[in-house]
Amino acid sequence: MNRIKKKFEEKSADEKLMSLFITAGYPDLDSTVEIVLGMEKNGADMIELGMSFSDPLADGPTIQYSSDIAIKNGITIDKIFEMVVEIRKESEIPIILMGYMNPVLRYGVQKFCEKADLSGVDGLILPDIPVDEDEIIERHATANNIPLIH
């Protein structure tokens, strides 16, 4: 069962879930896994792991800043998948990748979805892709058990 769905089923109707966001690779490449595990130990139910993009127009100044630092630190999609693999060695917290479609297209949609599944990703948020145009990724995401979260 998908970890996101399982997390919602574990909570009663009146309980809230806490989903926290962190930009992968910020403040440095080596601390992301430790920060995610710390968030979980301190009550996070889910993690949104930000995938940096050089032109984050839909994000505010804080995420633009952290994305810029992460890119300067050398973050890549493959390094993000490696981080998820490391987190999975110690945790089953649901991890949702959040970012822009351009890096996914550049990486290769099918390859991205396959590696996301293999690494232990539970969902994907791509706010710059309109719902009626998500067929660009929907088929590959579904085939690899990665729900698109609109």
Image (cartoon, rainbow, N blue to C red):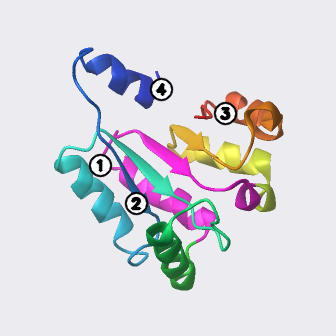
| Snapshot quadrant of residue 12 | top left
Mark 1 or 4, closer to the camera: 4
**Label 4 is placed on what type of residue?**
Asn
Distance from disc 4 to disc 2, alpha carbons, whole Å, reads 21 Å
Distance from disc 1 to disc 4, alpha carbons, whole Å, reads 17 Å
Image spot of residue 149 (x, y percent) = 58, 34
Q: Are dots 1 and 4 in contact, CB under 8 Å?
A: no
Image mark for residue 90: 1
Does label 1 or label 2 sit earlier along the sequence?
Answer: 2
Residue placed under numbered mark 3 in the picture: 144
Image mark for residue 6: none
Q: Are dots 1 and 2 in contact, CB under 8 Å?
A: no
Image spot of residue 71 (x, y percent) = 57, 78
Residue placed under numbered mark 4 in the picture: 2
- In the displayed structure image, the side of residue 70 where residue 104 appears, left or right: right
**Label 1 is placed on what type of residue?**
Glu
Does label 1 or label 4 sit earlier along the sequence?
Answer: 4
SS of the residue under disc 2: strand
Q: Which residues are magenta?
A: 76-104
Q: Are dots 2 and 3 in contact, CB under 8 Å?
A: no
- In the displayed structure image, the side of residue 138 where residue 52 appears, left or right: left
Image spot of residue 26 (x, y percent) = 42, 73
The one of 42 and 34 positioned closer to us in this rendering: 42
Dot 1: few (<14), some (14–19), or many (≥20) neighbours within 10 Å? Answer: few
Residue placed under numbered mark 2 in the picture: 22
Dot 3: few (<14), some (14–19), or many (≥20) neighbours within 10 Å? Answer: some
Distance from disc 4 to disc 3, alpha carbons, whole Å, reads 12 Å
